[in-house]
Each structure stands twice: as structure tokens, then as C-alpha cells.
Amino acid sequence: MEIFVAGLMVALTLVIVATRRHGKDTSILWASIQISISLLLNLNPVYVSADRLLGGRNYADLTANLLLLVGVYFLARAIHRAASPTSESGASPRVLGSAAVVVTVTVAAALFAFIDGPATSTAFMQEYGAQPAAALYSAVQYAYIGAVMATAGWTCLKFRKSWSTGVYKAAFALVGLGCASAVLLVVHVLLLDTLHIFGEQETMKSLSGLYAWLNSTTFALLCTGLALPPARRRILTVLDATRTKTVLAELMPVWRKAVVGNSGVTLDTRVVADRDHRPRRQLHRMIVEIQDSLVRDCRARERIGDEGLQKLAQAGAHLDGQAWR
């Protein structure tokens, strides 16, 4: 299960990196990177190797948990900003502020110093969770995670009617369910910590299997919901560029006939940067030059003929039907 969850987060990170647009909020990028590292550190072979490098006293557990806290802070902030309509976006709730995560990280690090965990353990809370400091160390972290994920989930629920586009509606529904699952996970962990403190080992063991299921469900819902919009946008961009290139190829002979003898400035593809919108800009420029030739040169219409006029109209319709990115 740990490999599955870590794989989901790494996959989400790759999707975000591949589809990220310049100038956009980077909260989700920072969240996915930090949570991915945290989850990778929780894989037993990675954990043992990392903790050996850090001194062998479970500092890898502290590192993973602090990264998770900061990652959840960025994640909840990204969800809040994305789910809130522009007209409603204002100051984030206090629980999503930077002060809250700083206090939580500081308290968690301070409590870790009081835990007696001399040997590297891949089951840290199972071995040392009976210590009050360890229970508080876990409780502080999960209380913060529960609070911010509940706030993010409420944001998705509050503004659910603002998203009419199918993919966004589905994405934020999944994210909202993921936030709800995260809150259930938090309640479950706090219950396990309490049982451990009171020595209810048998009850704790009977309930511990639910952790893996809730953890996997939470990340599956969140990762799927967060990946849907950028993945869809990227796919549509590729399909749009492919179709635009086809229209360009069909219109090129018409353009060549139309601009024969044109002494003005004509299309120079070398001055257009090689980006996703380059074919779109080329097509727009080509249509403008053909239309300009038809106005200035009375013989241009004869040269391109009815078939050329039809291709020009189709190219214009294609361009009008596409949203500029």
C-alpha cells in the first residue's frame, strides 16, 4: 500500500510538472513535491537508508512528517484557491495560514526531542507510541492535517455549484471526497494513539488495518481529482495543435496563390516562438494575409478559386472555435 500511495503522488507530481503554465500559482507543485518526498521516505528501504545517514535515531521519521505537514499546508491552500470563485477569493482561513503550519512544525519537532527512540524503526509509532511524547507528537500533526483538510473540503462543498464544466465538477467532487477521507483518517489515527497510550493493544491491532485502506483511498481521490484538470488541458492542447497543423497544411497552397506579387510583409514563421500556440498564431497570420490580398488584389480571388475560399472559411471557423491559451 505504501508503494501504491507513493506512486500516486509521484505520478501527480509528474503531471503537474508536465502541464504547469508559467505565471500560475505554484502551491500545488510545492505540495506534490514535498508530499512525494515524505511518502518515499516512508518506504522501508528508503527510510532505513535515510535514517542511517541522519544518525540512526529516527530523524527520518521527523523529516518525513515535517515535509508532510508543509506539503499539506500548500495542498490545502491550492485547493482553497482553485475551488473558490474569483469573486469570492479573499484571505484564506486562519487554519490555512503560514503561522499555523509554523507553530505545528515547531511543536512537533520539540515533542520529537522528548521521545526515547534510540534505534531506527520502520514502525515508529507501533514501537514508541506508548510514550506520551510520541502520542502528542502524532496527535499535533494529525490534528493540524485534519483541520486544514476539513477546511479545504468545506471550500469544495461550499462552492460546488460554481463549477459547471464537467471535468472541474468531477475533479472537485473527488477532491472533496478525498478531504473527507483525510478527516476520517485523522480521526482513526487519533483513536489509535489514544488506545496505545491506555495500553489497549488488542483493540488497537484490530483497528490498525483500516489505516492502510483510508490512507490509500485518501490519496487516490485527491491525486485523481487534482490530476484531472491539468491532464485534460494538456490533452486538449495537443489535439488542438494537431488539428491546427492540419488546417495550416491545407491552407498553405491557398496562401501561396493569394500573396503572389504581394510587396507587403508576408508570413515569416521564424519570428514565432516554438510554443504550443505557435500553429494558432501562424494560422491567424495566414488568414489575415489571404484576406488582405483579396481586398488589395482583384485577381487573388481568381487564383485561389472557390475551393480556396472554402478552405479559408473553414480555417477561420476552426480558429474562431478554439480558445486562445
Image (tube, rainbow, N blue to C red):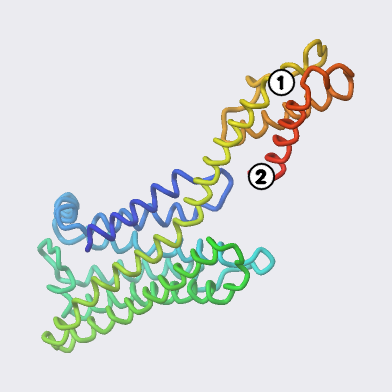
**The one of 60 and 77 positioned closer to us in this rendering:** 77
Q: Is residue 300 left or right of residue 310?
A: right
Please say if the residues under marks 1 and 2 sit with CB atoms less than 8 Å apart: no
Disc ID at residue 322: 2
The C terminus sits in image quarter: top right
Residue 256, quarter of the rendered image: top right
Secondary structure type for disc 2:
loop
Residue 127, quarter of the rendered image: bottom left
Name above or below for residue 6 compared with residue 236: below
**The one of 25 and 108 positioned closer to us in this rendering:** 25
Q: Is residue 222 left or right of residue 193?
A: right
Dot 1 alpha-carbon crowd within 10 angstroms: few under 14, some 14 to 19, many 20 or more: some
**Residue in view at x 20 percent, y 86 percent:** 195
Name above or below for residue 24 compared with residue 216: above
The amino acid pointed to by label 2 is Gln
**The one of 237 and 54 positioned closer to us in this rendering:** 237
Closer to viewer: mark 1 or mark 2: 2
Q: CA distance from mark 1 to mark 2?
A: 21 Å
Residue 142 point in image, percent of width and height: 34, 74
Q: How many marks?
A: 2
Dot 2 alpha-carbon crowd within 10 angstroms: few under 14, some 14 to 19, many 20 or more: few
**Residue in view at x 69 percent, y 66 percent:** 87
